[in-house]
C-alpha cells in the first residue's frame, strides 16, 4: 500500500512492519495494541507471511525469537502487563543477539491499571526490565507518520545491531488517526550473515557477529548461558563472561550517534522543553501559540539516551520535561547536566494541555529568578 492514507497509529505500525519485510508476527491481544495484531492477521497471509496468536505473551516472545533464527524479520506487539511477561525472553534475545521488534503501546499501570488510557510508564522498564547488564535500543513516536517510519527503522536497527528493538508508543498515538504518506519503498538494511567457516560468536570490527540463520548449513549452538566463541556454554570463566557482556553493551553504546534521532528547535533559548512521544504534540502547540520562543529537544530514540543532544542548548537556564509518568526520563537527564530540571508529571490518561505547560514555564521562571530549586510542577 502506497500514497496518502488515513490511519490510526496501530494500523500505521503494522503497515510499516510489512513494508520493512516483517513476515512473522506472534502475539496475544491486549488493549491498546490489539489493532496491530488484527492488521497483521489480515495482511500477513497475503504477502506470504505468518501470523500466530499465542497462548500468552511469554509464548509470543519465544515464537518471535525462533522465527528470527529461522530467517524471518519478526515482531510482536503488547502493552504494559504483557511487556512485563516478556522480560525473561527479552533478556534471552539480548544474550543470544537475536534481532526482533517489540511494540509496546503503553497504558496506565501498575498491574492492569487503565487499559484504555494513555501513559508512558514503561520507559524505564524498557531500559532495565530484564536482569543483568545490557544495553538496548528503544524508539518513541509522536505521530501516526512516525509510527510507520520508526517501525521500519526498528527492524533495520534490530538487524544492524543484532538486538531486540522496542517501539515505545502510547495509547494516544496508537489510537489517533492522521493522514500519512506511505512511500513506494523503504530502505531495508539486512542482517549480516555468518560467513562459512567462521565461528558464530566472533564479532566484526563493530563488535557484532555474523548471523547464522537456521537451515543455511551452519553448525551452531544457541544458548542464553555465558558462551564462548563457538556458542557453547562456558559459565565458569569470569574473564569470558565480562568480555561477552562488555562486547554486547559496547556494540550499542559505541554507536550512540548512529542510533540517535532527535529534533532540536531554538538552540539559543533559555527555557527548553524535552519531550518524547505524545507530549511532544503539546510542546509544539505551545511553541506555535507563543510564537516559537521556547527551545525544544524532541527525542525519538530514547535508548540509548541521546545525552550529547543536551549540549545543543548552550544558553539553557532550565529544562522542562513533560511526561505521562512520574518523571522517568527526567531521572536519566539529571545524570548528564547541571542545568535545573523541572518535571511536569501527568497520570490518568490525558495529555498535557498548553495551559498546563504555560503554568510550568511560569514556575520555572520564578525558580530561576529566586534561585530556589523547583524539581516538579504538580498540575
Image (spheres, grey):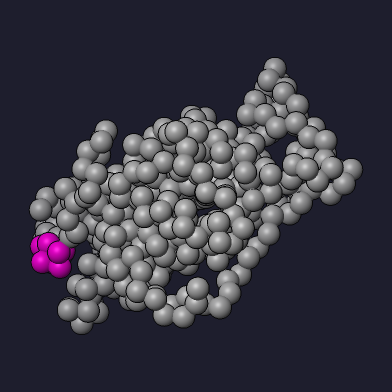
Report if residue 356 lies within the magenta region: yes
Residue positioned 12% across, 62% down in the render = 356
Residue 179 picture location, percent across and down? 34, 76
- Seen as rendered, the residue at the extreme right is 197
Residue that appears at 42% across and 51% down: 37
Quarter of the image for residue 264 reads bottom left
Majority secondary structure of the magenta segment?
helix
Q: Which of 210 and 173 lies nearest the eye of the viewer? A: 173
Q: Nearer the viewer, residue 144 or 18?
A: 18
Can residue 257 be seen? no
Residue 17 position within the rendered picture, expressed as x and y whole percent measured from the top left = 52, 60
**Vertical side of 20 occupied by 340: above or below:** above
- Name the residue located 24 percent from the left edge and 44 percent from the top edge: 115
- Read off the magenta span: 353-359
In the image, 96 versus 312, the foreground residue is 96
**Which residue, as the protein is rendered here, is positioned at the far top?**
236
Give x and y (percent) for residue 30: 34, 43
Q: Is residue 55 magenta?
A: no
Amino acid at each position: 500500500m502506497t500514497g496518502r492514507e488515513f490511519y490510526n497509529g496501530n494500523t500505521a505500525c503494522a503497515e510499516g512492519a510489512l513494508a520493512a519485510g516483517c513476515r512473522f508476527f506472534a502475539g496475544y491481544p491486549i488493549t491498546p495494541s490489539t489493532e496491530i495484531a488484527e492488521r497483521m492477521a489480515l495482511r500477513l497471509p497475503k504477502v506470504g507471511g505468518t501470523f500466530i496468536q499465542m497462548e500468552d505473551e511469554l509464548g509470543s516472545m519465544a515464537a518471535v525469537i525462533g522465527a528470527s533464527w529461522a530467517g524471518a524479520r519478526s515482531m510482536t506487539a503488547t502493552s504494559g502487563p504483557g511487556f512485563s511477561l516478556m522480560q525473561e525472553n527479552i533478556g534471552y534475545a539480548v544474550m543470544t543477539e537475536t534481532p526482533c521488534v517489540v511494540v509496546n503501546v503503553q497504558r496506565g499501570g501498575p498491574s492492569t491499571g487503565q487499559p484504555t488510557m494513555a501513559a508512558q510508564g514503561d520507559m524505564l522498564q524498557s531500559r532495565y526490565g530484564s536482569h543483568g547488564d545490557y544495553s538496548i535500543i528503544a524508539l518513541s513516536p509522536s505521530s501516526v507518520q512516525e509510527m510507520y517510519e520508526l517501525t521500519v527503522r526498528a527492524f533495520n536497527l534490530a538487524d544492524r545491531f543484532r538486538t531486540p528493538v522496542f517501539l515505545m508508543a502510547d495509547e494516544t498515538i496508537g489510537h489517533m488517526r492522521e493522514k500519512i504518506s506511505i512511500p513506494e519503498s523503504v530502505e531495508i538494511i539486512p542482517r549480516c550473515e555468518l560467513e562459512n567457516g567462521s565461528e558464530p560468536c566472533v564479532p566484526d570490527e563493530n563488535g557484532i557477529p555474523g548471523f547464522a540463520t537456521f537451515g543455511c548449513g551452519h553448525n551452531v549452538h544457541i544458548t542464553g548461558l555465558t558462551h564462548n566463541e563457538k556458542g557453547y556454554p562456558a559459565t565458569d570463566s569470569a574473564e569470558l563472561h565480562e568480555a561477552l557482556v562488555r562486547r554486547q553493551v559496547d556494540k550499542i553504546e559505541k554507536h550512540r550517534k548512529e542510533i540517535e534521532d532527535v529534533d532540536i528547535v531554538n538552540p539559543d533559548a533559555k527555557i527548553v522543553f524535552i519531550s518524547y512521544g505524545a507530549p511532544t504534540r503539546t510542546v509544539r502547540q505551545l511553541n506555535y501559540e507563543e510564537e516559537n520562543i521556547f527551545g525544544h529537544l524532541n527525542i525519538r530514540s530514547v535508548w540509548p539516551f541521546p545525552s550529547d543532544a543536551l549540549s545543543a542548548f548552550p544558553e539553557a537556564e532550565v529544562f522542562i520535561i513533560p511526561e505521562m509518568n512520574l518523571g522517568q526520563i527526567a531521572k536519566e537527564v539529571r545524570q548528564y547536566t547541571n542545568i535545573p530540571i523541572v518535571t511536569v508529571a501527568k497520570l490518568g490518561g490525558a495529555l498535557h494541555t498548553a495551559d498546563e505547560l504555560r503554568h510550568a514555564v511560569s514556575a520555572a521562571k520564578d525558580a530561576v529568578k529566586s534561585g530556589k530549586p523547583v524539581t516538579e510542577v504538580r498540575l
